[in-house]
Image (spheres, helix red, strand yellow):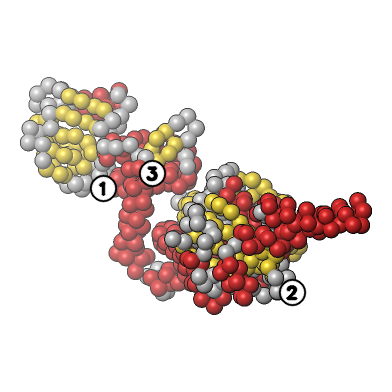
Amino acid sequence: MRRLEAGLTIRLRFACSLADIVQSAVRRGRAPIALDIILSQMSASPSILHIGPGGLLFSCHIVTIRLSGGANKTVSNNSHCEWRLSAVNLLEAMRIYVRVVERGSISGAARDLSIGQPAASERIERLEKYLGCRLLLRSARAFNCTPEGVIFYERSKRILHAVEQAIAEVTNEGQALKGTIRIAAPHCFGETIVPEALTLVRATYPELDLELVLNDRIVDLVTEGVDISFRLGQLGEGAFLARQLGQVGRVLVAAPGYLSQHGPITEPSELVKHPFIRVQSLFGTDQLPLRHVATVVESVPIRTAIKTSHWRPMYEMILAGAGIGVLEEPACVDALAEGRLVRILPGFDLPSFELNLLSQTQRQVSARVRLIVMMLNACTPEILARVRAEIDAHFDRYHASEINKWHALRKSLSLIDNVSESRSFQMAQQLIVAVFDNVDVAERAGRDFRNFEEKDLGFKIESGVLVQKDAAGKLILLDKQTRPFWGTVIGALTGGLIGMLGGPVGAMLGFTIGASGGLAEHAIKDTLDDDLVASISSKLASNRVAFILEAQEASPFEVDNIVLGYGGSVFRKPLP
């Protein structure tokens, strides 16, 4: 096989006349290639073998053909010729395909590229035939990329960017890229991500001047003289070329000091109880869209306490503990990593913002702007991906640091020195002791423990004991469900008999007091071993509460995050 490139003059043997070739192609609705054909030594009768989407296939005598339409020919040893995509046509088809994927429709891509929709569809079909695989799965209303289509899209973007750079480097315009490019971006994104991207642009083209305009409204490219615009969310109206760069995530956050003062937030319904700080244009109403990993998006009411027109005051007030709020990932990644902010409701996600790069249509934009658009289109997603990776890594580091805290707490307080020798909790895999400031906090944490168990999230409580050290230094069992039956009965009967001396009313009062006394005196000894009681009694401060759990299949994060969220201390140890 011999590959013939555009611009060469070749000699082939045709068994047909030029008129027959052209007329037959037109009758079939296919004008396969633009050729200048110089007849030479024509002979024999017409004999076209095939005309179809793949081009012309024919036998031939001597004819001189000069390729001027950007097509090339594959010539076999038996003197047959079949039309194929040239390098130029292939790049154009790749450009159309990339635009179709980014716009989500062929018609939208055709408008952006100033070509007809039928032409765009035909280029995609030819590209698929050339590659020998399907790139798009089409339906009546939409299409999806095949696995091959996803790979080809990513590779095509890189190739097109490299081609643009190569062209610029060998042309006069690329060698002396000068002038001013005006770029618009939203405040938060423009202050966190765009500077790094523009620094890369300036490093590549030091003679290029850049002007960055920041605002949170939709910019009209033509009337405001903007060459390139980063846009989050809705694209808005107008004639422009939009390239999707990715997603910008958002995080619901608060300062650790705020949560210590006001208590943890464990359910979306609790958000309305806390002052919410937000950018005025971010939400239209006092509703926050939240999505659980296993459910659909739902609107949760919030109570807006502070509105601002810029993200920076909101960020500073959240850091200062004035309330809670939602920040874009690039704005809070450092504060999360340093522990100055913590994530609220980590089991829920906020819908991300779609990020697009807008420029004027190809007929209106200069080659200089197209080149910078291609460069921003390549580097911005990489910066966003790095931020996303840092957010994920932060949570890994956070969990690791919490584990270290638990180890340190256990070493310093060590409520259960000899737990392995305890005769209680024989069926448990681990023993967990959580210490809280008061009964109310401990009971709220206990409800969260039960919620985890009910939701089947990998935590199973075999039993729980809630004890408190009173002012006299005695341990009191607080959880009524764990009261031993006989201890209560004995205490009640004893109190009742003594109370009968004062009549029926005295008997009832004595019965009640005796039951409580039986709980306090007997339940602790019947539920906990002497060594565990002694250890807790010696270490637990007055009026503080210890929640003792025997647990199976307990995650190290589910239980301990609850305890730490309520300001408590937690210890655990596997049991033999």
Q: Residue at x 63, y 72 (%)?
A: 537
Do we see residue 318 in this rendering? no
Q: Which residue corresponds to mark 3?
A: 97
Report the number of numbered marks.
3
Residue at the limit of the structure toward the left, as seen here: 77
Q: Which residue corresponds to mark 1?
A: 87
Residue 305 lies left or right of residue 55; in this view the side is right
The mark lying in front, picked from 1 and 2, is 2
Q: Residue at x 52, y 72 (%)?
A: 417
Q: Nearer the viewer, residue 118 or 453?
A: 453
Q: Amino acid at mark 3?
A: Tyr
Q: Going from the N terminus, do you reach mark 1 or mark 3 first?
A: 1
- Residue 14 figure quarter: top left
Q: Disc 3 and disc 2: Cα gap in Å?
A: 79 Å
Tell me the quarter of the image containing the C terminus. bottom left
Give how far across and how far down residue 505 sits, in percent. Answer: 91, 53
Q: Which residue corresponds to mark 2?
A: 472
Q: Going from the N terminus, do you reach mark 1 or mark 2 first?
A: 1
Q: Going from the N terminus, do you reach mark 3 or mark 2 first?
A: 3
Give how far across and how far down residue 29 sits, in percent. Answer: 32, 26
Q: Amino acid at mark 2?
A: Ala
